[in-house]
Image (cartoon, rainbow, N blue to C red):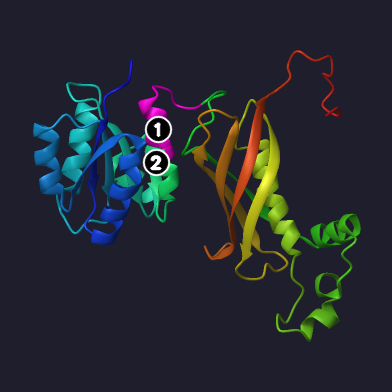
Amino acid sequence: MPTSPRQVLVVEDHPAIGQMLHFLLRPADCNVIVVAAGAEALRRLRQDPIDAVVLDLALPDVRVGEVLAWLRATEHARHPVWVVVAAAKRDEVTRLYGELGSHLLPKPFNPWALVEQLRIAQAGKVTPQNSVCVGQRACIIKTVTEQDLWAFSKVSGDSNPLHSDPEYAAKTRFGQRIAHGAFELGLILAVLGTKLCPGNTVVYLAQSVRFLRPVFLNDRITAECAITAVSPDRPVATVACRCVNQFGEGVLEGEATILFDPFPFDTAHDDADNP
């Protein structure tokens, strides 16, 4: 039996973004209502059977906090509300408004990921399998050492003196040795393979990447990954990836596609050294 269209309330004061979301969400079997302020959003929430809300916390509207409070208070009441919140900083939003769960989409967010979330919600499931869901995220932190540069050069065969020879590197535009770009990408791979999808074996399918600035010896790098979309019928996810240094400056950004399968717990290979 077909399901009725979902009522999606988009609270966004930027006309172009509101129009884009309206265009993208309608084919996902959604009736889309776009409003530009928190006060109007509250009025709509109180009078209409809203199923999902896309809320921009950067609205020039003092009632945004009231909208969030109303949503939290009524999430499981007469009007079931599935919340997606677009915000610039996850930690700041959590501090100001409380934990909003996996539906927080930090700006800039991928609108196609939002469409995918609504499709999954409408199908009555969070993810296809294995508890891998949009919004899931993980990170690792690594300080780049002399040993790291030497070991990576040896393993990769990349003997570029920019990474290994201090005198040579001092005469380049960087003024000192820098880490291999693939070393930073390797930190992303470590997050994908060991942190992001616990209980699953992760296979790396594709990656786009931009290197934004150099990484120097003794830099403290945080590699972060967040799932932005999950296929409704295959164990495949899209992941936003980035690395930042100790000053909060981006050094790498990109997007990965991964395949995730449950750990083969029923195999005879118990030894951690076995694949």
Q: Residues within 10 Å of mark 1 (few under 14, many from 20)?
A: some
Quick one: label 2, few (<14), some, or many (20+) residues within 10 Å?
some
The location of residue 110, given as percent across then percent down, is 44, 50
Q: Which residue is mark 1?
A: 119
Left of 122 or right of it: where is 55? left
Given residues 30 and 254, the one toward you in this image is 30
Q: Nearer the viewer, residue 128 or 77?
A: 128
Q: Position of residue 207 (x, y in %)?
A: 65, 52
> Which stretch appears magenta?
116-127
Give the vertical position of 258 relative to 240 (above or below).
above
Is residue 14 visible to the viewer in this orientation of the structure? no
Write down the quadrant of residue 159 in the picture: bottom right
Q: How many marks?
A: 2
Where is residue 272, by image quadrant? Answer: top right
Q: Which element type, helix, strand or loop, lies under badge 2?
A: helix
Position of residue 160 relative to residue 131, above or below, is below
Instruction: Determine the residue positioned at 65% across, 41% down.
Output: 192
Relative vertical location of residue 61 with respect to residue 236 in this rendering, above or below:
below
- Secondary structure at numbered mark 1: helix
Mark 2 residue type: Val
Q: Is residue 135 above or below residue 275?
A: below
Q: Nearer the viewer, residue 223 or 17?
A: 17
Which numbered circle lies on residue 115?
2
Residue 105 seen in render = yes
- Please report the residue visible at 74 percent of the width from the left and 57 percent of the height from the top: 183
Left or right, 120 with reference to 65: right
Q: Is 16 covered by the magenta stretch?
A: no
Q: Are marks 1 and 2 in contact (CB under 8 Å)?
A: yes
Q: Is residue 4 left or right of residue 178?
A: left
Which residue is depicted at the point 23% across and 60% down? Answer: 15
